[in-house]
């Protein structure tokens, strides 16, 4: 089999990037190449991407979890589609025109390592890539600042009536590794069975000497411009309606919670795009659930935003988003951009995570500052929740591309119109 130049390049630089992703790149000398591309690989890139100035729309899940692939709505609207089979690390790739924009739709497979390897392979062609927009489903905190929190005190619940709802979005360029913690069983479970208690960590994600890099808060002006463009599009988008099953599940969840908190929660609202000062992504391959871990994760979300923007947020200000792939993507793209430096082609990126499930069961007060997981159990409808989340996340990204199409071509219904694939019925 003839050697694949992209594969050889990825194998040579991949481990270096993943271990030193945010290290500043040395300035190239006059004799050095200002781009990692070689003359022979340029033709490979054009063949793989289908053109130049291509937007990469990336997802993880091809449908393994619930049967609904996260790329389904992009592929349904992709014109002149060409499937690409030459990838060594990406699960599937197809390029074409999406709402008048040259786009490649990529499924990496699930997990941070697969996302990083696929991104690194594609970044060999950075000269031809306009941007990366990652979209995927995730678990969300039930409420900004948590329903309960030890920082607020356990005698009363969060008085806010505002909650997260399935289909909500978190649009941000930042992620943190939730797994970076030094602890033991007794420290994690010292407050059991009171769920208004803090799992104790001796050392968290700030201690890079233990874990390597865990906080991914670097960004460029182009990253922020893209993030704000997608945020604006999401705020203007027309989202599908939630199904009766989803509405019923959320009503039951919040009715159970309200019985103990006394708060009348507001469910009658459309999909909400949370911005990068309100939410952040805490990645883990440990699928956790529980109010104490939601506190830890919201704290981590505050840490990454504070480091990025110099703010002074706490877990009481945050919605946390629990997913997997973002730390791999961000470390790979950030490492690549550092490698090429200001003289090469840096690739801006942003992440759209969409609410597919609530991160802990309803809770109830036992009095005297003690809270327990409710005995009234509810079964989340993952199939319906994930399908709706995929629909809302896709709507935000498709609306971004649609607005670009309309800016360039006017209100052209044929060129700039889209319809979601018929997999979600409200």
Image: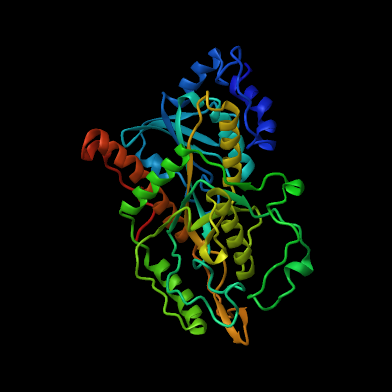
x and y, in percent, of residue 213 in the image? 68, 44
Residue 34, by quadrant, is top right
Q: Nearer the viewer, residue 98 or 301?
A: 301
Relative to 227, does residue 184 appear above or below in the rendering?
below
Q: Residue visible at 63% across and 75% down?
A: 196
> Toward which corner of the image does residue 248 lie, by quadrant?
bottom left
Please state which of residues 207 and 46 is positioned toward the viewer in this rendering: 207
Q: Is residue 31 visible?
A: yes
Percent position (x, y) of residue 242?
37, 63
The picture places residue 265, in percent across and down from the top left corner, at 42, 75
- Between 380 and 58, the one nearer to me in the picture: 58
Is residue 57 at least partly visible in the picture? no
* Rendered view: 186 above or below 57: below
Task: Tell me the quarter of the image containing the C terminus.
Answer: bottom left
Indicate the quadrant containing the N terminus: top left, top right, bottom left or bottom right.
top right
Vertical side of 49 occupied by 326: above or below: below
Coloured how?
A: rainbow
Across the whole image, how many numbered discs are drawn on residues? 0
As displayed, is residue 96 above or below residue 4?
A: below
Residue at (67% x, 70% y) in the render: 198
Q: Is residue 235 left or right of residue 352?
A: left
Q: Residue at x 37, y 41 (%)?
A: 76
**For the view shown, which residue lies furthest in the bottom direction?**
367
Q: Position of residue 382 (x, y in %)?
A: 50, 61
């Amino acid at each position: 089999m003839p050697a694949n130049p992209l594969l050889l390049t990825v194998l040579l630089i991949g481990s270096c990037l993943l271990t030193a992703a945010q290290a500043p790149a040395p300035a190239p000398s006059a004799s050095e190449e200002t781009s990692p591309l070689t003359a022979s690989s340029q033709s490979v890139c054009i063949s793989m991407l289908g053109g130049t100035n291509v937007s990469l729309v990336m997802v993880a899940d091809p449908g393994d979890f619930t049967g609904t692939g996260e790329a389904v709505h992009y592929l349904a609207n992709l014109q002149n589609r060409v499937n690409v089979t030459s990838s060594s690390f990406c699960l599937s790739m197809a390029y074409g025109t999406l709402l008048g924009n040259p786009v490649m739709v990529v499924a990496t497979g699930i997990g941070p390592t697969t996302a990083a390897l696929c991104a690194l392979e594609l970044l060999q062609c950075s000269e031809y890539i306009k941007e990366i927009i990652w979209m995927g489903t995730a678990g969300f905190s039930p409420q900004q600042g948590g329903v309960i929190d030890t920082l607020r005190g356990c005698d009363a619940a969060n008085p806010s009536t505002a909650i997260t709802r399935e289909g909500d979005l978190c649009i941000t360029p930042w992620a943190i590794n939730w797994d970076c913690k030094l602890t033991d069983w007794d420290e994690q479970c010292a407050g059991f069975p009171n769920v208004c208690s803090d799992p104790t960590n001796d050392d968290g994600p700030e201690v890079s000497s233990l874990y390597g890099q865990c906080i991914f808060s670097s960004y460029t002006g182009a990253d922020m411009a893209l993030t704000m463009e997608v945020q604006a599009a999401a705020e203007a988008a027309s989202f599908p309606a939630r199904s009766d099953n989803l509405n019923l599940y959320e009503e039951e969840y919040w009715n159970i919670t309200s019985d103990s908190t006394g708060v009348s929660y507001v469910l009658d609202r459309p999909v909400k795009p949370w911005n990068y000062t309100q939410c952040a992504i805490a990645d883990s391959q440990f699928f956790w659930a529980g109010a104490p871990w939601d506190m830890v994760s919201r704290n981590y979300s505050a840490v990454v935003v504070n480091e990025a923007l110099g703010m002074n947020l706490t877990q009481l200000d945050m919605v946390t988003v629990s997913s997997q792939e973002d730390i791999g993507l961000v470390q790979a793209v950030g490492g690549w951009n550092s490698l090429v430096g200001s003289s090469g082609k840096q690739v801006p990126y942003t992440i759209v995570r969409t609410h597919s499930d609530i991160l802990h069961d309803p809770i109830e007060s036992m009095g005297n500052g003690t809270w327990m997981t409710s005995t009234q159990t509810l079964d989340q409808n993952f199939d319906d929740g994930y399908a709706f989340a995929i629909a809302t996340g896709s709507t935000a990204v498709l609306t971004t591309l649609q607005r670009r199409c309309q800016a360039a071509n006017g209100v052209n219904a044929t060129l700039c119109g889209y319809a979601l694939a018929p997999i979600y019925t409200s």
